[in-house]
Amino acid sequence: MFWTALLGLTALLWIIEALVLARGVPSIPSLEDATPAQDANCPPISVLFAGRDEAEKLPSALETMLGLDYPNYEVIAVDDRSLDRTPSILEAAVQGSRRLKAFRVESLPSGWLGKPHALQRAYEHASGHWLVFTDADVHFSPDVLRRAITLASERNWEHLTLLGRAEMFTFGEKLVMTFFGMAFLIGTRPWEASNIRSRGYSGIGAFQMIRRSAYEKLGTHRRLAMEVVDDMKLGKLAKQAGVRSGVAKGGDRVTVHWYRGLGNTIRGTEKNFFATTGFKLWRAAAQIGALLLLCVFPVVALPFAHGWGRIFATIAALLPAVAAVGVARELKTSPLYALTFPLGALLFAWMLARSTITTLWRRGIIWRGTFYPIEELKRGLV
């Protein structure tokens, strides 16, 4: 009876979540449906990014940023103490484009993480009425700014985050990103960002456009000086400050290759996963337990369950697979990757456990070549 009841609870939770997703996901607008703004309706925009040791990915990404079809914009790049060819790449690009301004951080002041500090520096050199925060490896389509401005204007948003598309090449990358896409929708419910009665918020590092006055109202990146999850927390600050926020599907207009291969993905997210829990061990343990209960337990129990238990296990195994099909379609991968969600859950549970253990063992994180003690990170949480 205990296992049947547990499977019944799991099935009920998935039914509720399926209904929430079925209502919420279709309500997210698409940039595809926004008409590109005419020149007269294009306010000045500053595209801002911080990079460290980005020599491999920066040239192609920078080419798309400097090739935007927008009449009045600039790109502000801040090199955060790079040790590779990033400075020379930026220097050469500055010589070839009047739109690009590049600056370098030689040393990191106390009380700052490298990325928030570099983005703060970028803002201080920006002149746009609107700011677009992005990363040094993100690719834009030429019309992305014109469509984003139209959408923000039509919806009366002061802060717009775009759900871009992750480029994936290996089985491991596709497995982890398919599950990540579903987990992101369930965990953040991005459609709630525009609901003023909801506490929901969202922010994605690949593309966050915010009106300059709204960004200054929420306190700029000085409020995020020691925040590891700075992109999501920018969305949180915007919501708390009463800034009108929204999320839209960017599709192929915003693309990024997150990490090369599964191993790099695991290592690259080591600093982030425990940080998403607020560096709370009990919360990390609860999330790992939820992943195993909701995504792995029904599949494992299905061959052994009988009667109502088997019915509940089937429901709990089928519904997340159906949800993952939609995610796979958005990511332009085979729908068969929806069947890998139990493996994705196991992998995410391991990544969270690994991040938690490593952070606690080191008593901090290493990010962009600098060690940050966990006590300082906790004091800087937003």
Image: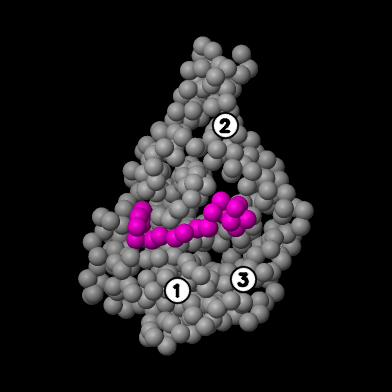
| Percent of width and height locating residue 228 | 61, 61
Residue linked to disc 3: 114
Image quadrant occupied by the C terminus: bottom right
Real-space CA distance between mark 3 and mark 1, rounded to the nearest whole angstrom: 21 Å
Q: Secondary structure at mark 3?
A: helix
Q: Quadrant of residue 268?
A: bottom right
Q: Amino acid at mark 3?
A: Gly
- Of the pair 334 and 325, the residue shown nearer to us: 334
Q: Nearer the viewer, mark 3 or mark 2?
A: 2
Residue range (magenta): 248-268
| Percent of width and height locating residue 63 | 39, 74
Residue linked to disc 1: 59
Give me the residue at 23% from left, 75% from top. 40
Q: Quadrant of residue 224?
A: bottom right
| Percent of width and height locating residue 232 | 52, 57
Q: Is residue 200 left or right of residue 356?
A: left
Q: Relative to 306, is 346 above or below? A: below
Give me the residue at 49% from left, 37% from top. 340
Q: Nearer the viewer, mark 2 or mark 1?
A: 1
Magenta region includes residue 343? no
Magenta region includes residue 266? yes
Label 3 with label 2: CB-CB less than 8 Å: no
- Of the pair 37 and 263, the residue shown nearer to us: 263
Q: Secondary structure at mark 2?
A: helix
The 10 Å Cα crowd at callout 3, few under 14, some 14 to 19, many 20 or more, is: many
- Extreme residue in the top direction: 307
Label 3 with label 1: CB-CB less than 8 Å: no
Q: Amino acid at mark 2?
A: Val
Label whose residue precedes the other's in the sequence (3 or 1): 1
